[in-house]
Amino acid sequence: MESEAKKIKIALICHFMNTTVQRALGMDGSEQELAPWISLEIEEIKKRNDIELHVISPFFKIRINKSFVDRNIHYHCIKVGIPLMRRYWPVYFRFNTWTNFYLFNLQVRRLINKIKPDLVNLSGAENAYYSSSILGIKGYPILVTIQGFVSLNSEKAVKNPIVLKRIEIEERIFRTLNYYAIEATFMEKFIRNFNPDARMFWFHFPFAKTNVVTDVEKEFDIVFFARVTKMKGIEDLIKAVSISREHLPEIKVCIIGDTEFEYLNYLKAMIENLKLTDNIVFKGFLPTQTAMHSEAVKARISVLPTYNDTIPGTIVESMLLKVPVISYNTGGIPDLNKDGENIIIVEQGNVDKLAEEIVRLLTNDKIRNELAEKAAKYATEEFDNTHSVNLMTEAYKTVIEDYKKRN
């Protein structure tokens, strides 16, 4: 056992939600899980005796700031939104964007100066309502963990003032700060457009390992499990299924995930016009990852023709479930084939090719089974959560030492 004196003190600024936090904050348990990779990272760090982790996160559904401790994890839950009320600011009163998130940022700066961490780790530059706080922190080494890029989100309305503020903050972070944790080659290229001298550290976000049985009877040919949006490629999938039905008239698709009511009606109308009503089933949002995986594993293949992603959890989880994957050539997805073909990758937007690969996989048991085994082996080795947190810990130590030398 290492002594308390040898622990490095890390302040992690992020947003997340899980049942542990809900119970500690006296919530009713109705809040959806948010950013599960943060919860998994916390659980891995909790196993260690060389880190004291201070998690600083914004919460709307509390009236006042609350803190609690679980072993070596210190939670600091900061109230955001209307003071003393469990409510957001109204849409017409953009207090946060007008003030550059002043209230939250002031509280974070005060808390950081009280904690006096060895390093501050921001997880997610794209979420301005908390990431903006990093720009006011001085005198500490800062590592930015990249989750994604809001400016690459083609679904966002560029004239929306909230989105414009997010893009502004994200770009200021890239121009100002020097240390970044990344998990895909495109991330490095994107950041260097703003900061050619930025230093990069490679890692993977932790992934939830499934405990469901993978050898089950198949009820569906295809599963799509992600937020059901145009950006995630759901419309391309529906069009590809329509083309695939010429070869596979009984093709069955299971769609799992949350979506807006109006968009769901739009998709159902699209499906009806394409005469696919008997081919596609919507399961909606499933409350737990186990429930989602239990449904996903009933499919022969997983298809995620996403337009903007890092390394999607859907793909990694499908690989671990031994459900072969087809996806688009975007973001960090091509990196999954760095050691050979572990997933099928199609040119972005090429719906005809997407349909062709769907038919090829569904009609060739040998290719499908070989791909499933190879992908599962790769994902099990590449996405080991303990190894991921070890990589992040080494990045912490390197940044701290480098910062000391430069200052």
Image (tube, helix red, strand yellow):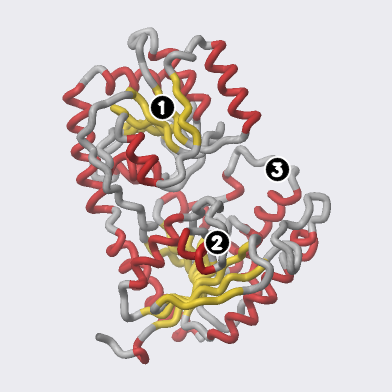
Q: Residue at x 41, y 27 (%)?
A: 254
Mark 3 or 2, which is nearer the eye?
Answer: 2
> Is 332 located above or below residue 307 in the figure?
below
Query: What residue is disc 1 on?
Result: 254
> Is 238 located above or below residue 193 in the figure?
above
> Is 140 located above or below residue 385 in the figure?
below
Q: Nearer the viewer, residue 379 or 263?
A: 263
Q: CA distance from mark 1 to mark 2?
A: 30 Å
Q: CA distance from mark 3 to mark 2?
A: 23 Å
Query: What residue is disc 3 on?
Result: 158
Question: How far across and how far down the image is residue 185, in percent?
Answer: 41, 51
Q: CA distance from mark 3 to mark 1?
A: 32 Å
Q: Name the amino acid, label 3.
A: Val
Q: Residue at x 54, y 84 (%)?
A: 115
Number of the label disc, if any, that sits on residue 301: none
> Is 143 located above or below residue 400 in the figure?
above
Question: How far across and how far down the image is residue 157, in percent?
Answer: 69, 40
Instruction: Say if residue 178 shows up in the picture.
Output: no
